[in-house]
Amino acid sequence: MLALPLASVPDAAFRVLCLGAHADDIEIGCGGTVLHLAATVPGAEFTWIVLSGDGTRAEEARRGAALFLGSAARAHVVVKAFRDGFFPYVGASIKEYFEELKRDQTPDVIFTHYRGDRHQDHRLVSELTWNTFRDHLILEYEVPKYDADLGTPNCYLPLDDATCREKTRHLLDAFASQRDRRWFTEDTFRGLMRVRGVECAAPGGYAEAFYAHKLVVRPRPCEGR
């Protein structure tokens, strides 16, 4: 299997934009990848945007970001207050915010929700990501839930066991309000990463998976030619 590096220029700035509808979405969908990039890419700069959150959930969103971005060279965290569960009905306001992002952000890679996600808030965020950023690498992450909308991803980032343990530990530490949900367990998160690790033959046995709907490949000239 051919591996394509995300950040291929050592020490160069590598700008990462993470978009999530709710507190814990980014952490569940690409938290392991964020931990890996923050630890291994010296020039990684993260913009972390959670689009809904007030009171306890806003506090959890900031705590989750702090835990996952602790090793990052630079990080900017934004927690907005669009109404949870009502994104399609306040879509114009969210669209206006995305237009602001377009003026301010020039990311090298964007992590956002899967376009086939059955949660209405997640789906709108994915649609606006594609509508707004038309010349960027966009990787859509998955969030397990009752809706049974997990699909067949086509892009993987292998993870080792230590990173998976760190991810699940941070999730359970940061989001106390979610612990009574039957699906919000260490087994759920590790199980999904284990399945994705099997699918991509990850050396460490685990991986996070994404949907890459568009990729532009620019082969490098061979040395000596």
Image (cartoon, helix red, strand yellow):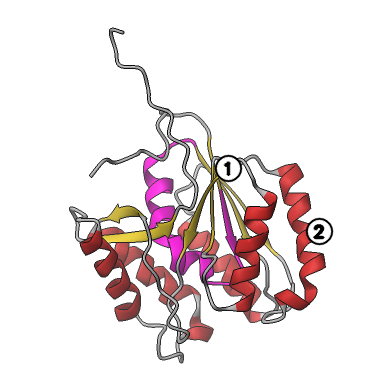
Amino acid type assigned to the residue bearing label 2 in the image: Glu
Q: Which residue is mark 1?
A: 136
**Residue that sits furthest to the top in the current view:** 224
- Report the residue at 46% width, 92% height from top: 180
Which span is picked out in magenta? 17-43
Q: Is residue 196 left or right of residue 52?
A: left
Task: Please identify the quadrant where the C terminus is shown.
Answer: top left
**In this view, 223 is above or below 145:** above
User: Is residue 122 located in the magenta-colored stretch of the structure?
Assistant: no
Q: Residue at x 53, y 33 (%)?
A: 13
Q: Are marks 1 and 2 in contact (CB under 8 Å)?
A: no
What residue appears at the point 26 percent right and 40 percent down from the top-left corner? 2
> Within 10 angstroms of label 2, few (less than 14), some, or many (20 or more) residues?
few
Q: Quadrant of residue 52?
A: bottom right
Residue receiving disc 2: 96
Q: Quick one: 21 or 170, which is closer to the camera?
A: 21
Magenta stretch: includes residue 24:
yes
Q: Nearer the viewer, residue 94 or 211?
A: 211
Mark 1 neighbour density, 10 Å: few (under 14) some (14–19) many (20 or more)? some
Kind of residue at disc 1: His
